[in-house]
Image: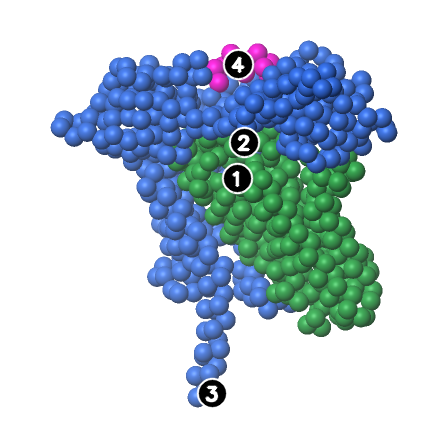
Chain colours: A blue, B green
Amino acid sequence: VNSKASPAADRSPPEQAPAPSAADREVKQTSTLVVGAVLLGLVLQVWIPPGGFTLVAAAFLASMVLVAVGWLAPGKLRSTIAGFRFIATLLFVLAVMAILGTLILQLKPATFYLTRYGVIGKLIVALRFDDIFHGLPFALLMALFGASVIASALLRWPVKLSNLGFFIAHVGLLTSLAGAGASATLSLRGRIDLHAGGETATHVLITRANQPTGERAALGFDLHLDKFDLVNYEPEFRVGYYEQTAVTDERGPHLSWRLKASFDPDTERHRLPSGDSFRLTGIYPDFAPTPDPASGTVKYGTASQDWKNPAVSLEASVGGRKVEQLLFAARPQAVFLAQDRALIFERREKEVKAYISHVTAVKGASRTSTKIAVNEPMSYDGWTLYQVNYRPEDPTYSGLEAVYDPGVSWVFLGFTLICLGVFTMFYVEPRLKRRAPAAAAAAARA
Amino acid sequence: MLQYVLAEHPFFVATTALYTASAAFYAAAWRSTKAFVGRAATALMAAGLVLNGTLIVQRWIEADRAPFKSLFESLVFFAFCIAAVYVFFEFIYRTRVFGVPAAILALGCLAYALSKWDAEIVKLPPALQSPWFVPHVMVYFVGYAAVTLAFALAIIQLAAPRVAFVQKLLSFKAGTIATGKPLDVEGINYELVRFGFALLTIGLLVGSVWAKSAWGDFWVWDPKENWSLVTWLVYGGYLHLRRVRGWRGDKGAWLLIAGFAVVMFTYLGMHLLPTAEESAHVYNSQ
């Protein structure tokens, strides 16, 4: 493969090749710092339990110490922690931690791990891998990450147009981390259970990992649920094609009917996955048979176009043989094409489209009435209220989540800066770098 | 099943046929010196892309929502993104050498979609009825398509010094490489990853903003969130390591293959995790 850079690719050379000893030193320092952070975290965790405060305090303090030591101490520590090798190593180790967090269920009671994992469960609890993302090993790795971002950004100070994107992205990372730190330590989260026309909420029941802690926090205003709407999708009537398939579940291996295809009720001929076909010869939204005195038979018809008592006449072709049957959505009937294949005309049960709380917040003389739905939270007096729960059996009940999070604006500001920085770094800086030598050459010619 | 798809979903079959034909023509362009063969391959790929887009629009209208809810729908969209990113890069680099892997990848998505066929269009639950849903999914899948193509190119990059035929492909051939210059696979790969990484970054952050508006938390350490972060970290690691001596050759290519494995696990493997039962991101049909 030709190693020449393509026209559109980044032409910047790899970081200046270090002498073998310098590269060795970098590898040695990187592994010492990363392995040391994990081991130190594991040891200190014996005395310092995981938690939001542990994560933020340890990460902040350790990163500040590392940046200071890197700047003040003799040697090349600063260039190591600002280097590409160090940050890449760190990103991979953080990836491993993130993977571990998906392999081990987090924030469960100790007994859960012992019963589910046995001896390994004891190890998980002892190493506090039941709360990986708030533990000290993770905090110290985040400290290294923070120190690396600060060191690499400082190395590029003062900012030039040619490294503007890098600087913005790294400032964005720090801003997000600071905001996330504020969220982890200062935010409050809890449940508010309300009934329409019922009691007024003045407090939030604080939760952690969705479990109540028993604490309460004052909202600072009164919240009243005026009305609760449970909005369903319109019911549908469909022709379902089912096949009997072998399944294995908690009941053991058995045969089960599975929906394989579904069709709108129309009069076109439809092909089925089995190769058979069917068509509806009559569709009656509100089935009403009328006797035909002339022939002495009953004629199928519909009393109205409203789907009150829907029925269809279904004609199926199975291996050249035709089968016709009248099917009602309200009755459990099927046209069996074979022992393990059937067509059913059925009503799809109502599905929840939205659940909406109409609430009024009262603070002193001020009254604010609004609605809260999923994806449409309400912000009031520092709190943001989210629609999170409903009970089908209790149409007056609404479950809200109240969140007080002073860090979130900083997190989102950081996100914006990261996106802006990445775009500038990848698509603006290379153009500027290409333009600079061209401008210099033009000036020289002039 | 095939008869059913052929009769009930002709656009799906036509899209598959066009991608298959384009793969055949792109492969023929490796050998042929006639410009027509390469042009026909591009035309077929573009036609497949248009029909794939039509398939998505048709489903959008039928479902009355963005067709990104089920695994089947996402696979159809993934095929579209792979073809779209490929056609864009073919236009930029003026080479058709990578048309075969791109068409095969798009075909692979459609073949897998066939095995995960939706029995019925499902309704959107309240949490997915967000203005962030469409940008989040679109940005992610275009990013996934870019790193998927980077994976294919990484294999070519690794094979080139070892397999004479692959090495020959990367040199000038009329109708295949319009510029006539030898190809820098590593450079194209870097460009793809850079593009993909920028989109993965935006997708991850848009997802966080959406999570905040739906559940009140921008990050809940959900398995899918974690694996999206792992994807971002791996490609971030690649972009940093590329600046370290010795990481632009085989090692970098292997890293891209590992990155693709992570992407695929993030996309398709969530149900295998013990934490899947607590995730809001696992496809129902898996």
Quadrant, the N terminus of chain A? bottom right
C-alpha gap between disc 4 and disc 3? 76 Å
**Which residue is label 2 attached to?**
B123
Looking at the rendered image, the disc whose residue lies closer to the viewer, 4 or 2, is 2
Which residue is at 23% across, 27% downward? A361
Q: Is residue B42 left or right of residue A75?
A: right
Residue B127: x and y, percent? Answer: 46, 32
Q: Indicate left or right for A90 with B36 as reference.
A: left
Kindly identify which chain the residue marked by label 1 belongs to: B
Coordinates of residue A177 in the picture (x, y in percent): 38, 41
| Relative vertical location of residue B178 with respect to residue B147 in this rendering, above or below | below
- Secondary structure mostly seen in magenta is helix
User: Marks 2 and 3: which is nearer the front?
Assistant: 2
Mark closer to the chain start, 4 or 3: 4
Q: Pointer 2: residues within 10 angstroms few (<14), some, or many (20+)?
A: some
Q: Are marks 4 and 2 on the same chain?
A: no
Instruction: Identify the residue position indicated by label 3 in the image.
Output: A445
| Boundaries of the magenta span | A108-120
Kind of residue at badge 4: Phe
Task: Residue type at mark 3: give it.
Answer: Arg
Q: Which residue is mark 4?
A: A112
Q: Chain of mark 3?
A: A
Q: CA distance from mark 1 to mark 3?
A: 60 Å
**For residue A237, which quarter of the picture?**
top right
Check disc 3 and report its element: helix, strand or loop. Answer: helix
Q: Nearer the viewer, residue A207 or A330?
A: A330
Name the mark on residue B65: 1
Verify CB contact (< 8 Å) between mark 1 and mark 3: no
